Image (cartoon, rainbow, N blue to C red):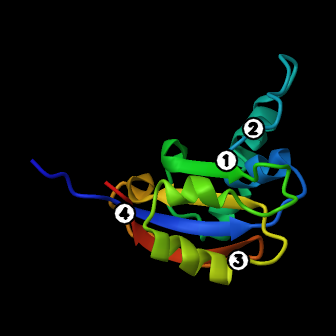
């Protein structure tokens, strides 16, 4: 029985540190207000969180972070994204297409599996922080 391969949306970004890359591509929360916080303060905290810059820049589309990978460069960004990792996920021609688009200072691959949108409408595009390389079929 042959399984259907899924699509993978590939982005390349330039961050100074892995922490900056993760703070952009993954949701995170401010510290929860203390016990003495008013209901209004707590509600304001809930309204602000989770902080997720990538999702905001992608237009607030539904995304499940369990299907998003942030792949930091092997050597702290000195030689670019981890192309070897991407080669394990995509065909060689697709990796080469991404390399051709990549900025010279690119350090991070952000991979969004098609399952992240749970079948809802998701139109990937470049943002101020990352370049959209394309959507490719994952290797089986």
Residue that badge 3 annotates: 102
**Seen from this angle, which residue lies furthest left?**
1
Circle number at residue 29: 2
Q: Residue at x 81, y 47 (%)?
A: 18
Horizontal side, residue 96 vs residue 24: left or right: left
Q: Nearer the viewer, residue 69 or 106?
A: 106
Closest to the camera, between mark 1 and mark 4, is: 1
Residue that badge 1 annotates: 26
Mark 1 or mark 3: whose residue is earlier in sequence: 1
Q: Is residue 125 above or below residue 87?
A: below
Mark 4 or mark 2: whose residue is earlier in sequence: 2
User: Pointer 4: residues within 10 angstroms few (<14), some, or many (20+)?
Assistant: few
User: What is the C-alpha distance between the residues marked 1 and 4?
Assistant: 19 Å
Closest to the camera, between mark 3 and mark 2, is: 3
Q: Position of residue 6 (x, y in %)?
A: 33, 59
Q: Residue at x 83, y 16 (%)?
A: 35
User: Pointer 3: residues within 10 angstroms few (<14), some, or many (20+)?
Assistant: many
User: Pointer 1: residues within 10 angstroms few (<14), some, or many (20+)?
Assistant: some
Q: Residue at x 45, y 53 (%)?
A: 116
- Pointer 1 and pointer 2: residues touching (CB < 8 Å)? no
User: Pointer 2: residues within 10 angstroms few (<14), some, or many (20+)?
Assistant: few
Residue that badge 4 annotates: 120
Q: Quadrant of residue 99?
A: bottom right
């Amino acid at each position: 029985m042959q399984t259907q391969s899924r699509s993978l949306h590939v982005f390349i970004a330039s961050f100074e540190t892995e922490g900056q890359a993760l703070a952009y591509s993954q949701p995170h929360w401010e510290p929860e207000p203390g016990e003495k916080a008013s209901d209004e303060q707590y509600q304001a905290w809930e309204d602000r969180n989770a902080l997720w810059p990538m999702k905001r820049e992608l237009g607030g589309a539904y995304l499940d972070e369990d299907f998003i990978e942030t792949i930091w460069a092997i050597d702290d960004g000195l030689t670019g994204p981890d192309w070897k990792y991407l080669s394990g996920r995509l065909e060689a021609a697709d990796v080469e297409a991404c390399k051709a688009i990549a900025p010279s200072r690119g350090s991070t691959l952000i991979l969004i599996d098609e399952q992240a949108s749970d079948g809802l409408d998701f139109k990937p595009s470049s943002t101020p922080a990352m370049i959209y390389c394309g959507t490719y079929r994952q290797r089986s």
